[in-house]
Image (cartoon, grey):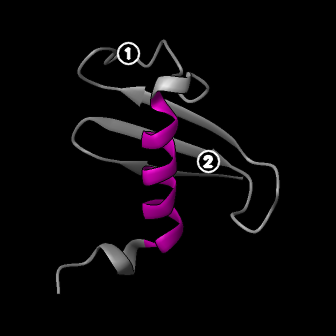
Amino acid sequence: MGYALRTDRYRLVAWGAKDRDARDFELYDYQADPEETVNLARKPEHAERVKDLTALLDAGWKALQPK
């Protein structure tokens, strides 16, 4: 199953549950690629962004609510 997180600029999709060792990711930049034609997730220059967005996704929607 896939889980997705959308920001103003990016969409991250994580395939597989967060408790699994192997997950696959898709990352799209809506400013540069609004049609989602280029998956940036495996490009080294986007590794930190994938890590940060994955942490937000794994925290769940309740963690993103305003305090």
Q: Nearer the viewer, residue 27 or 35?
A: 27
User: In this rendering, would 15 be left or right of 60?
Assistant: right
Q: Residue furthest bottom?
A: 67
Label 2 packing within 10 angstroms: few (<14), some (14-19), many (20+): many
* Label 2 element class: strand
Amino acid tagged 2:
Ala
> In this figure, which residue is indicated by the disc labeled 2?
14
Q: Which residues are magenta?
A: 46-60
Give the farthest residue toward the right: 21
Q: Which residue is mark 1?
A: 35
Badges 1 and 2: C-beta atoms under 8 Å apart? no
Up-down relation of residue 59 to residue 17 (above or below): below
Question: Residue 30 appears at what percent x and percent y?
Answer: 29, 25
Q: Residue placed at 17% from the left, 87% from the top?
A: 67
Q: Is residue 28 above or below residue 35?
A: below
Q: How many marks?
A: 2
61 over 11 or under it: above or below: below
The amino acid beneath tag 1 is Glu
Q: Is residue 62 magenta?
A: no
